């Protein structure tokens, strides 16, 4: 199992381990196959982001190494909210919303982890064991093992205590105790001996390890991965349109593919190591090829294709690739309606009446002004004469009159000014 931890170090996925800094105790523990390793996930949204993909894949790596991953959905703790990394308290979610979110995320986990076979994954909702515990029992049996003095030294608590504007509520302050109790319950009920999570979870994980030691005089282990940031120090997983989500109805497969494809040269090798299941030799070979000709972006293409196929499947990857190629060439008329909606979801758009199209001769100059892609007919004429305007992938002529044939799939016309400025005219 030292090979597994060495591989995690190569991938930049080893930050801290309990028992000893180098993880030797954890490595010895993992020499016995079939260990159960858990990670918790917050269901306060109806999807997870690519930041959550790293711990999911960490569980997958343990599964491939002969261990059993345990996914814990925070149906109970999600109603409290983890203060780690948060500047203010999260809005409270209803039980019904949390239950809906858990169901959605369950399907996602089942697509990434194997729930069959000798190392089958297990998915649990901590509401099932936190819900029945009374407040008095939690204080008596668990709370007495925690020192307030040590709790306020945890980074997640201390940072909020120092904020005069927000502070921290007793509700959030209690989160650490609940998560520690999760580990104890999983240890007793499911034989879970290892918890993994982001480095911001270190305090919570250590508290669980300590609770197991005090209550059961047994050893458990924790492992954290570094929080992911870009090489320039910026937050990873954010775009101009917001977070990159793992469900296709929140971030389309095309947008997901483009996010990875647009990785910088400074970040791409690190992302290949962390977010793909490629072997070390394959990653290093891609690194050599990329260094020789970075303009070919072979590493970015490998990253985008592997992660998109893993999450959304080969068919969605093929569709995303076709859409990307069509957008680059400008020949978008052959794309299906779903692909067009994905590609141009964030493009500037305008709405126009189909009745006006049928009732009148709408020349191209009037149409361009109506879309506001140009400010005047004079500007429109100049751009058309210079070849800078195309419609549905074809150059526009001055004498063109719009008709039904200019509507792709009967509902949109795609205009491009120059090489990169697109506009979607929607007909209603």
Image (spheres, grey):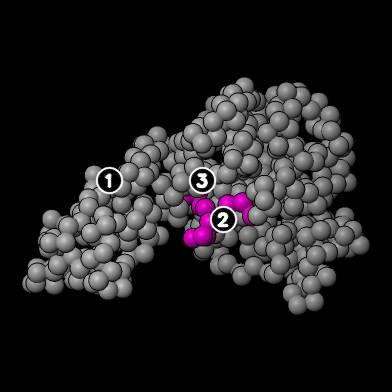
Drawn side of residue 203 relative to residue 344, left or right: right
Residue range highlighted in magenta: 235-247
Task: Give yes or no for contact between labels 1 and 3 (Cβ–Cβ under 8 Å).
Answer: no
Give residue 331's mark.
1
- Choose mark 2 or mark 1, whichever is in front: 1
Task: Give yes or no for contact between labels 2 and 3 (Cβ–Cβ under 8 Å).
Answer: no
Q: Which residue is mark 2?
A: 238
- Vertical side of 278 occupied by 261: above or below: below
Q: Earlier in the sequence, mark 2 or mark 1?
A: 2
The C terminus, quarter of image? bottom left
- Choose mark 2 or mark 3, whichever is in front: 3
Looking at the rendering, which quadrant does residue 7 occupy? top right
Residue 255 in picture, x, y percent from top left: 44, 50
Task: Give yes or no for contact between labels 2 and 1 (Cβ–Cβ under 8 Å).
Answer: no
Drawn side of residue 214 relative to residue 305, left or right: right
Residue 208 in picture, x, y percent from top left: 79, 48
Per the model, the C-alpha gap separating discs 1 and 3 is: 21 Å
Callout 3: 10 Å neighbours few (<14), some, many (20+)? few
Q: Secondary structure at mark 2?
A: strand
Residue placed most toward the observer, 33 or 22 = 22
- Vertical side of 218 occupied by 359: above or below: below
Q: Which residue is mark 3?
A: 262
Task: Report the residue at 27% width, 74% height from top.
Answer: 376
Q: Earlier in the sequence, mark 2 or mark 3?
A: 2
Q: Earlier in the sequence, mark 1 or mark 3?
A: 3
Residue 191 in picture, x, y percent from top left: 72, 36
Report the predominant secondary structure element of the magenta stretch.
Answer: loop
Task: Report the residue at 49% width, 39% height from top.
Answer: 304
Per the model, the C-alpha gap separating discs 2 and 3 is: 12 Å
Whether residue 241 appears in magenta in the rendering, the answer is: yes
Q: Secondary structure at mark 1?
A: loop
């Amino acid at each position: 199992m030292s090979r597994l931890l060495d591989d995690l170090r190569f991938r930049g996925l080893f930050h801290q381990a309990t028992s000893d800094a180098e993880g030797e105790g954890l490595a010895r523990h993992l020499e016995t196959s079939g260990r159960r390793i858990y990670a918790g996930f917050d269901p306060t949204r109806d999807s997870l982001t690519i930041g959550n993909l790293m711990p999911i894949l960490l569980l997958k790596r343990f599964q491939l190494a002969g261990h059993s991953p345990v996914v814990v959905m925070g149906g109970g703790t999600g109603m409290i909210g983890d203060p780690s990394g948060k500047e203010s308290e999260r809005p409270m979610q209803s039980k019904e919303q949390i239950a809906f979110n858990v169901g959605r995320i369950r399907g996602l986990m089942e697509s990434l982890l194997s729930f069959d076979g000798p190392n089958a994954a297990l998915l649990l909702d901590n509401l099932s064991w936190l819900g029945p515990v009374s407040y008095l029992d939690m204080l008596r049996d668990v709370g007495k093992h925690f020192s307030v003095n040590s709790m306020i030294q945890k980074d997640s608590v201390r940072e909020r205590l120092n904020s005069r504007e927000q502070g921290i509520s007793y509700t959030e302050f209690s989160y650490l105790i609940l998560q520690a109790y999760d580990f104890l319950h999983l240890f007793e009920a499911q034989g879970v001996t290892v918890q993994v999570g982001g480095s911001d979870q270190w305090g919570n994980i250590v508290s669980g390890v300590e609770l197991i030691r005090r209550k059961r005089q047994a050893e458990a282990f924790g492992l954290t991965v570094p929080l992911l940031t870009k090489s320039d120090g910026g937050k990873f997983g954010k775009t101009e349109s917001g977070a990159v989500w793992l469900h296709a109805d929140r971030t389309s497969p095309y947008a997901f593919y483009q996010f990875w494809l647009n990785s910088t040269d400074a970040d791409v090798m690190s992302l290949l190591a962390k977010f793909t299941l490629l072997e070390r030799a394959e990653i290093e070979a891609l690194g050599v090829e990329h260094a020789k000709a970075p303009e070919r972006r072979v590493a970015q293409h490998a990253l985008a294709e592997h992660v998109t196929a893993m999450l959304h499947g080969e068919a969605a990857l093929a569709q995303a690739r076709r859409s990307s190629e069509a957008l680059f060439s400008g020949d978008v008329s052959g794309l299906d309606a779903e692909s067009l909606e994905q590609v141009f979801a964030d493009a500037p758009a305008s709405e126009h009446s189909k009745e006006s199209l049928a009732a009148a001769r709408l020349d191209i100059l009037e149409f361009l002004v109506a879309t506001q892609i140009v400010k005047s007919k004079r500007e429109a004429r100049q751009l058309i004469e210079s070849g800078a305007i195309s419609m549905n992938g074809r150059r526009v002529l001055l004498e063109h009159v719009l008709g039904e044939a200019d509507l792709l799939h009967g509902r949109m016309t795609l205009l491009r000014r120059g090489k990169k400025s697109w506009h979607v005219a929607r007909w209603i």
